[in-house]
Image (cartoon, rainbow, N blue to C red):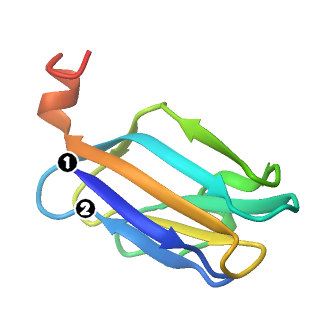
Amino acid sequence: MRYNIGLLTTADAEIYRCGSSTMVACAVWIANGTGSNRKVNLMHVPADETPDDKFALLDNASIRGEAHTQLEAPIVLNPGEALYARADAVSAIAMTIYIVPADQYFGGALR
């Protein structure tokens, strides 16, 4: 499943919350549509917790102007866990994530 997150703001935004089955974010695409370098945070927040930098997968990661990056390391999301993101400027960073059920990812269907 593909989730187009759109443009981030400077506030922590929930971009995906895992339902009742374990899921895997197998790719995260991050694009900077401005001409200036921008920073982005991506957090993997456990169930019953609030967003905090201590959960950061990316902590103020720099994205060059008019550039993009892609994370392809699997992020395993158990029920109730969530991904949050924020940027250092409004309407600068866009994000897309690809999420699949864990049994499909680890069962070899996507290898």
Q: Nearer the viewer, residue 73 or 3?
A: 3
Number of on-image labels: 2
Q: Is residue 99 visible?
A: yes
**Residue type indicated by callout 2:** Cys
Q: Position of residue 101 (x, y in %)?
A: 16, 42
- Tell whether 107 sits left or right of 89: left
Residue 17 in the image: above or below residue 57: below
Q: Is residue 89 left or right of residue 99?
A: right
Look at mark 2 in the image and give the residue it sits on.
18
Residue closer to the observer: 33 or 12: 33
> Where does the image place residue 38, in percent across and percent down from the top left?
81, 62
| Residue shown at 11% from the left, 61% from the top | 20
| Residue at point 44%, 55% (across, down) | 96
Q: Position of residue 82 (x, y in %)?
A: 38, 65
Query: What residue occupies the far right of the structure in this picture?
Result: 36
Asked if the residue at tag 1 contacts the one at tag 2, i.e. Cβ–Cβ closer than 8 Å, the answer is yes
Quick check: 80 left or right of 88?
left
| Residue identifier under label 1 | 22
